[in-house]
């Protein structure tokens, strides 16, 4: 019954990445709460992890760690290193954005993107 | 732009981009069968050239060590920005943090205190273990530093704000964050002083599979570990300062 879906299976990682990006962006566009918005930004960012790891994947290949076996064909360590730095930067940038939200709340008394108007001098 | 219009524009953009996505996804190399020339090259020569068995660390600290330096400073900037934003208004309008009226502050449950006290030490130990095994097995400064910072958070949950601040001094975290990033940069300058390219590995590489193999990578890894643990420590401290319990006597920092 599911046989006809099998050719679509290789598209799954790209579809997952695009879906995460899309739903995250949709939620950012319609968000009514800045903390929620930052959570959605993390979802968008998760799509880049999926994309990078999927691009570096190789069927049946082990991790690029050659501690207990000789170097052979393995999945791509370059993309794994990129994802690693991506995650750490994502966490610190999230903290920076949350600090901005705290400031906004203190100064304007609201954290609803709809109710924040551009600053006037 | 009204919310409804914005949503319509977003959906329109999605519909327009869908054929492009379908085209790209269908013409990509098949999943799991990509040509990975760069990664394959590193997998093939990494152990022989750099005497480490964790290729991800070899890339982070050696082959693409310069990227990691940039990333280190990005983290430094983000942490500095957070600190400035949070410290900017603290105590400006009033000396004491406000408390939400009508919300009682409940004492922590004994079980929380017990579990957090037990786990905090083990978590920090595990973080050190992960940090030290950067060159051999999956591990490294980034992961280890974050785990150590989680241990700090557990210590806060177990001890409460006041007890936590007795041991967690901001100077310590500041020094770890700045010192770690500086250590990484100094590794690069040390290579230059010896007449080699920036961040060129010039220390003895050691034996592959050994905990202390990899030469200069070990120092860089320690720098990254310090910077990440310190940076996340600063973030925890700054956010906790924002939510601290009101105290009868203002603690001096």
Image (tube, coloured by chain):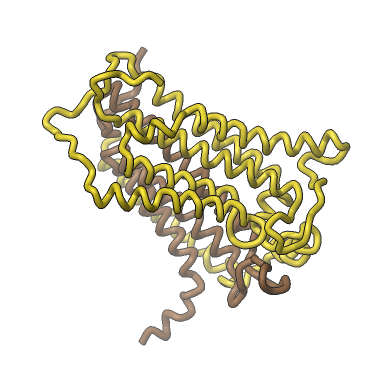
Chain colours: A brown, B yellow
The answer to whether residue B104 is left or right of residue A85 is left
Looking at the picture, does residue B161 appear above or below residue B116?
above
The answer to whether residue B158 is left or right of residue B150 is left
Q: Quadrant of residue A119?
A: top left
The answer to whether residue A89 is left or right of residue B165 is right
Q: Residue B36 location in percent, x, y?
A: 68, 65
Q: Residue B218 location in percent, x, y?
A: 69, 48
The answer to whether residue B34 is left or right of residue A101 is right
Of residue B15 and residue A72, the one placed in the foreground of this image is A72
Of residue B178 and residue A87, the one placed in the foreground of this image is B178
Q: Residue B56 location in percent, x, y?
A: 64, 57
Residue shown at the point (46%, 69%) measured from the top left: A12
Looking at the picture, does residue B63 appear above or below residue A70?
above
Q: Residue B228 location in percent, x, y?
A: 54, 41
Looking at the picture, does residue B66 appear above or below residue A65?
above
Q: Quadrant of residue A18?
A: bottom left
Residue shown at the point (73%, 38%) measured from the top left: B187
Q: Residue furthest right?
A: B195
Quarter that holds the N terminus of chain B: top left
Quarter that holds the C terminus of chain B: top left
Q: State the count of labels.
A: 0
Of residue A99 and residue B239, the one placed in the foreground of this image is B239
Looking at the picture, does residue B93 appear above or below residue A94?
above
Residue shown at the point (30%, 34%) measured from the top left: A113
Residue shown at the point (56%, 48%) measured from the top left: B142
């Amino acid at each position: 019954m599911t046989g006809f879906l099998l050719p679509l299976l290789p598209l799954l990682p790209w579809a997952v990445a695009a879906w995460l990006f899309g739903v995250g962006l949709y939620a950012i566009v319609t968000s009514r709460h800045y903390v929620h918005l930052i959570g959605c930004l993390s979802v968008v960012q998760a799509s880049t992890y999926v994309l990078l790891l999927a691009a570096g994947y190789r069927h049946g290949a082990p991790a690029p760690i050659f501690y207990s076996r000789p170097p052979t064909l393995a999945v791509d360590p370059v993309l794994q290193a990129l994802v690693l730095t991506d995650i750490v930067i994502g966490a610190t940038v999230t903290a920076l954005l949350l600090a901005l939200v705290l400031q906004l709340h203190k100064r304007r008394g609201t954290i609803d993107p709809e109710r924040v108007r551009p600053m006037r001098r | 732009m009204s919310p409804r219009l914005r949503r319509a524009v977003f959906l329109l953009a999605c519909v327009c981009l869908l054929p492009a996505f379908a085209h790209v996804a269908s013409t990509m190399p098949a999943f799991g069968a990509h040509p990975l020339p760069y990664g394959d090259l590193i997998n093939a020569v990494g152990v022989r050239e750099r005497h480490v068995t964790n290729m991800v660390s070899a890339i982070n600290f050696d082959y693409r060590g310069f990227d990691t330096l940039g990333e280190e400073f990005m983290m430094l900037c983000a942490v500095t920005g957070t600190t400035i934003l949070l410290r900017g208004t603290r105590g400006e309008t009033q000396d004491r943090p406000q408390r939400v009226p009508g919300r009682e502050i409940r004492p922590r449950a004994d079980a929380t205190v017990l579990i957090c006290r037990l786990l905090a030490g083990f978590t920090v130990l595990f973080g050190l273990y992960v940090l030290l095994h950067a060159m051999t097995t999956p591990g490294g400064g980034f992961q280890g530093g974050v785990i150590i910072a989680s241990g700090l958070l557990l210590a806060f949950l177990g001890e409460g704000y006041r007890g936590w601040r007795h041991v967690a001094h901001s100077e310590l975290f500041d020094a770890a964050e700045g010192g770690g990033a500086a250590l990484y940069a100094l590794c690069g300058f040390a290579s230059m002083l010896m007449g080699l390219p920036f961040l060129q590995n010039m220390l003895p590489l050691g034996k592959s599979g050994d905990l202390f193999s990899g030469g200069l990578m070990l120092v860089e890894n320690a720098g990254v570990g310090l910077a990440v643990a310190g940076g996340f420590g600063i973030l925890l401290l700054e956010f906790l300062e924002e939510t601290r319990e009101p105290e009868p006597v203002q603690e001096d920092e």
